[in-house]
């Protein structure tokens, strides 16, 4: 498990590499038929081939293209090469989100190829897969709109933690410690007259120690991840962070074999102390990492320098967080001034980060610095930094470039603002209160999310921008109340939103939710709720016009498809029109061809006869390709070609030539 990531390529290399990569794959797969014995490669995989597959899977997120290359290479690979390729196929499942199949395949491959390097860590990979499922369950719990669903997902999350993560890690650590003790006894017992045997045993012992340390470190990382998902101040969370601090300290003091893991364990130790309410001790431990700054000269490689600089940034952010959580923002500001003015004016590389991967870490630090400045008296400077972060990341360019990283940064920012509200900082504008409410929901505290969103309704001015955020505040109140089981309060919030802010961005979704809640309550309780049903239907109809109506159909189609109701999904996809009336005339629906591609996908899924389903779905897509090109709808044509390729290369078919031709 590598902790140090490879150095990024130059801009010129990154710009041309995708082209070279695609050319390599295309040439490899379309090798001249005049030389039937020719192949991409033979025997073991070369380092370049391994890099190619990793780039396809990780950098370009193209498991299907990776599978095409792997299928060709498997024909001429050695036994070890086939094992590596099979493991890459398992990775493709994980990248596609099929964690259960990935976990099952990893364990099966470990039995099939017991001597492969990844087979030795198959159990650990299974634990990591369980952590992914645990994280998915927690995400579902956060966004669940009913108490029963929320409790079910929380129960699933906690069960996975106890049965598939905590117990497996603990059992294997005991096994590895037993192996280390056993071979250590053999080393002690060997005769001094037999140095060769002792040397062999020492080498074996070092290997066992390395494996044991890896399992112990993974336990630290797992406890930290799981603890962060629990509601703040819950007894279980406090207990786990106290345990984490003890375990991380022991790891730092006793495990010397891997400096990267020791530094990372030191970071975990400081963060655990901060979460346990020990800010002074946490800051002291984390500042040990902040002070590290290796030279760029040998023996430090550039990757090592980048790794340590990343640690410095995370550690400083952790120090600030510790002070902020303890309402000691002035101490945080003193630390910042000392570092920036007396130690390293360039730290933390805000202006010229040497690697784009450092940018999210700098953003994390900026969040904590802005909190420190606002709470510490420099309100103007803190708000300026906070707004700069929002402008930079909540921007279409950022969402297009890195949607996952952007979401994580904005979620972290929302949690930071909620911490600011914890510190009794008030008089914020509506936007910050709404973001803070979202932060509370992320932290598993929907009741506080409701109270915080209410502050937005009476804050700031009443201009158009403020009205948008007040509408979002009402939507947040509705969602969080719904999650708490307060359906009547949720309905009231949605109704107020629809009636008070009919021009807002969220009015269509609020109308839909209001209609759904009133419909349920009208059936269950009757009375006034039943009388409200015609009004709810009217709101739903009025606010689902224009593009909002098409977006609603797209959302409903996607939900139906996820539930496996392909007939309903196809009907909804095909009901999305090519144009809508925005009040000034007809305007093209930007996702029309994507919706039609979805309809064809559902048609293919509905068919029981594979050949007939392929003809029907591909014929439907081919008829639309010329229209998309004539409309100059590049994204629409791309969506159609992608779905056409998936028909030929997916879980029901494996025709590489037709898939490549479609793309």
Image (cartoon, helix red, strand yellow):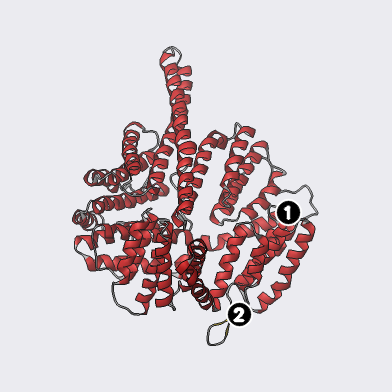
Q: Residues within 10 Å of mark 1 (few under 14, many from 20)?
A: some
Residue position marked by numbered label 2 in the rendering: 579
Residue at 23 percent of width and 56 percent of height: 336
Residue at 62 percent of width and 32 percent of height: 111
Position of residue 614 relative to residue 128, above or below, is: below
* Quarter residue 46 falls in: top right
- Pick whichever, 382 or 493, lies toward us: 493
Q: Is residue 602 left or right of residue 246?
A: right
Residue at 41 percent of width and 45 percent of height: 225
Q: Residue lying farthest front?
A: 527
Measuring from the top left, give residue 385's x and y in whole percent. 30, 66
Measuring from the top left, give residue 370's x and y in whole percent. 28, 61
Compare marks 2 and 1 and give the one earlier in the sequence.
Answer: 2
Res 520 visible? yes
Measuring from the top left, give residue 198's x and y in whole percent. 45, 18
Q: Secondary structure at mark 1?
A: loop
Q: CA distance from mark 2 to mark 1?
A: 34 Å
Res 30 visible? no
Q: Is residue 545 left or right of residue 257?
A: right
Contact (CB < 8 A) between labels 2 and 1? no
Residue at 32 percent of width and 56 percent of height: 365
- Pick whichever, 57 or 499, lies toward us: 499
**Which of the numbered marks, if any, corresponds to residue 653?**
1
* Quarter residue 120 falls in: top right
Q: Quadrant of the C terminus?
A: bottom right
Measuring from the top left, give residue 221's x and y in whole percent. 41, 42
């Amino acid at each position: 498990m590598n902790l140090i990531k490879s150095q990024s390529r130059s801009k010129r290399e990154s710009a041309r590499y995708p082209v070279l990569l695609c050319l390599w794959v295309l040439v490899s797969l379309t090798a001249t038929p005049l030389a039937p014995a020719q192949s991409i490669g033979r025997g073991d995989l070369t380092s370049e081939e391994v890099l190619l597959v990793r780039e396809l899977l990780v950098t370009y997120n193209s498991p299907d293209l990776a599978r095409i290359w792997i299928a060709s290479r498997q024909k001429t690979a050695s036994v070890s090469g086939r094992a590596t390729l099979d493991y890459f196929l398992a990775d493709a499942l994980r990248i596609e989100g099929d964690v259960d199949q990935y976990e099952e395949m990893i364990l099966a491959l470990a039995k099939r190829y017991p001597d492969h390097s990844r087979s030795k860590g198959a159990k650990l990979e299974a634990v990591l897969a369980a952590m992914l499922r645990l994280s998915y369950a927690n995400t579902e719990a956060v966004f669940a709109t009913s108490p029963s669903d929320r409790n079910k997902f929380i129960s699933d999350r906690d069960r996975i933690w106890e049965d598939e993560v905590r117990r497996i890690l603990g059992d294997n650590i005991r096994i590895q410690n037993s192996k280390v003790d056993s071979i250590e006894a053999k080393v002690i017992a060997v005769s001094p007259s037999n140095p060769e045997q002792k040397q062999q045993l020492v080498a074996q012992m070092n290997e066992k120690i390395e494996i044991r340390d890896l399992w112990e470190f993974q336990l630290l990382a797992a406890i930290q991840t799981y603890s962060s998902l629990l509601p703040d101040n819950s007894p279980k969370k406090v207990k786990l962070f106290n345990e984490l601090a003890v375990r991380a300290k022991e790891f730092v003091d006793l495990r010397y074999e891997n400096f990267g893991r020791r530094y990372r364990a030191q970071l975990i130790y400081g963060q655990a102390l901060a979460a346990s309410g020990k800010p002074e001790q946490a800051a002291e431990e984390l500042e040990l990492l902040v002070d590290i700054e290796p030279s760029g000269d040998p023996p430090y490689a550039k990757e090592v320098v980048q790794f340590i600089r990343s640690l410095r940034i995370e550690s400083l952010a952790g120090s600030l967080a510790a002070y902020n959580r303890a309402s000691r923002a002035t101490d945080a500001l003193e630390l910042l001034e000392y570092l920036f003015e007396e130690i390293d004016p360039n730290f933390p590389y805000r202006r010229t980060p040497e690697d784009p991967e450092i940018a999210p870490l700098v953003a994390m630090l900026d969040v904590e610095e802005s909190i420190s400045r606002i709470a510490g008296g420099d309100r103007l400077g803190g708000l300026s930094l906070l707004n700069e972060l929002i402008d930079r990341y909540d921007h279409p360019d950022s969402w297009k470039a890195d949607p996952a990283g952007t979401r994580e940064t904005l979620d972290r920012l929302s949690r930071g603002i909620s911490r600011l509200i914890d510190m009794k900082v008030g008089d914020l504008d509506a936007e910050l209160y709404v973001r803070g409410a979202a932060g509370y929901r992320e932290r598993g505290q929907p009741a506080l999310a409701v109270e915080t969103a209410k502050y937005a309704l009476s804050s700031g001015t009443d201009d158009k921008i403020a009205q948008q955020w007040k509408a979002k505040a009402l939507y947040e109140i509705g969602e969080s109340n719904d999650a708490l089981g307060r359906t009547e309060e949720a309905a009231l919030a949605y109704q107020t939103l629809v009636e008070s802010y009919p021009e807002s961005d969220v009015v269509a979704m609020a109308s839909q939710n209001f209609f759904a809640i009133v419909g349920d309550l009208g059936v269950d309780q009757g009375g006034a709720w039943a009388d409200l049903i015609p009004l709810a239907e009217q709101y739903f109809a009025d606010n689902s016009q224009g593009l909002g109506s098409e977006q609603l159909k797209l959302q409903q189609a996607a939900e139906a498809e996820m539930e496996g109701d392909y007939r309903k999904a196809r009907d909804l996809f095909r009901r999305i029109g090519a144009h809508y009336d925005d009040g000034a005339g007809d305007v093209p629906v930007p996702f029309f061809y994507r919706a039609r591609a979805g309809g064809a996908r559902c048609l293919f899924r509905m068919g029981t006869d594979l050949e007939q389903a392929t003809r029907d779905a591909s014929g439907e897509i081919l008829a639309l390709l010329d229209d998309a090109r004539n409309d100059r709808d590049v994204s629409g044509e791309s969506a159609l070609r992608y779905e056409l390729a998936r028909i030929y290369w997916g879980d029901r078919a494996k025709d590489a030539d037709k898939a490549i031709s479609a793309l």
